[in-house]
Amino acid sequence: MTEKPQTPTLSPLVAAQHRAMPFTRLTDCGMDPADARRLLADTAAGTPWPDVAAALAEAQLERARRAAESGHGATARQAYRFAAAALMFAQMAYQTDTAEKRELYARHTAAVAALAPGVERVEIPHRDGVLGGWLCLPVGTPRATVIVWGGLSSWGAAYLSVADAYTTRGLACLLVEGPGQGESRLRHGLYVDEQVIEGFARFVDLVENDPRLDGPIGVQGISFGGLIAAHLAAADSRVGAVVVNGAPAVPTVPEFRTAREQLSAVAGTDERGRLTEVMDSLRFDPDKHRITCPLLLLHGTQDPLVRYEDQEPFLRAADPATSTVRIWPDGEHTLYNHAAERDALTGDWFVDHLAGRGTSES
């Protein structure tokens, strides 16, 4: 009789990491599927998460260097993207802004920068710091631009696959790190506060001032970032269409310590009263905040973090005639497990609502 191999018992920390960063999320945000399986297997066996992820990234960086030296540019770019994704997930192991987290994210940024000129770094002065992002352009003249941002833990170039879907359809895509995100926070000390929408609006300014991007502007917010996208769409008439994916309309301060630490890092404070003030300032009230541009709301019924009811206020703030809801009965948080279909849907939706139906694709 053959015995079945025993499944290792995960420590509470590793179990939480596997829940927060499942295989579907790892691959959605760009990891090599083989690396994603290795990361989950090795951490289940006891190797610390950031050590495994960083080692996988280093192997991909070495692969990229060898490919570039041999003149195999496509292979080098693929490996740099896999490395960047591995480093994105390596830094997620740290809830607070430790020196290790900053160093891993700086390495992630360097890996993405190696994708130039296909991925262009942009930086905008804001307050006493700098906001950063990555611009991806289609072949030919963009018919419109979509600005995309993430939430509490994955930012900017984590969404290169989204940019791929959009540039294929003739749209420019700006992947941003707003206040409380990425280098904007870790290097320049810009956090989420009562004026955070002004920070994200600076990316709309950038698009308006770039002569290559002469066309309508859409915004897309993923996870907590969807709340920011809804606020910006309600406040800024320059936004021509908005996608909200897996966002709470009424953010709260979590009771669980690890989740609260993550939110505290975004807001730059661990003082409970101050954190509550910031979250209260971001409550989306459909009686006060009206979305006049077309809205696409995405939801996964199996999302453990955001219920449909948590997103419903965004719909009440919009015109029913220009609002669309798409629900996946088996959808995970932000629809990790339907990534390709999700990105095709949102890409086509932005083409229809920004560039007009029938627009030719690259």
Image (cartoon, rainbow, N blue to C red):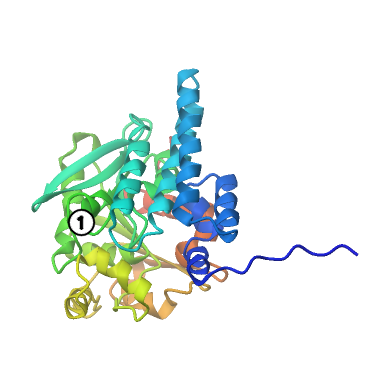
Estimate how packed mark 1 is, as few (under 14), some (14 to 19) or many (20 or more) residues with alpha carbons within 10 Å. Answer: many
In the image, 55 versus 78, the foreground residue is: 55
Q: Position of residue 320 (x, y in %)?
A: 35, 72
Residue at the farthest left position: 128
Q: Residue at x 49, y 34 (%)?
A: 78
Q: Is residue 361 above or below residue 51?
A: above
Q: Residue at x 45, y 46 (%)?
A: 54
Q: Residue at x 75, y 62 (%)?
A: 5
Q: Residue at x 59, y 52 (%)?
A: 37
Q: Is residue 62 above or below residue 83?
A: above
Using residue 287 as the reference point, say whether residue 170 is left or right of it: right
Q: Position of residue 233 (x, y in %)?
A: 24, 62
Residue at the farthest top position: 70
Residue at the farthest front position: 46
Residue 215 appears in the figure: yes
In the image, 45 versus 137, the foreground residue is: 45
Residue at the farthest right position: 1
Using residue 193 as the reference point, say whether residue 346 is left or right of it: right
In the image, 345 versus 183, the foreground residue is: 183
In the image, 170 versus 184, the foreground residue is: 184
* Mark 1 residue element: helix
* Quadrant of image for the C terminus: top left
Residue 358 appears in the figure: no
Query: Hey, what amino acid is under mark 1?
Result: Phe
Residue 167 picture quarter? top left
Q: Is residue 215 above or below residue 41?
A: above
Would you name the residue on which mark 1 appears?
200
Q: Position of residue 52 (x, y in %)?
A: 50, 49
* Quadrant of image for the N terminus: bottom right
Using residue 165 as the reference point, say whether residue 98 is left or right of it: left
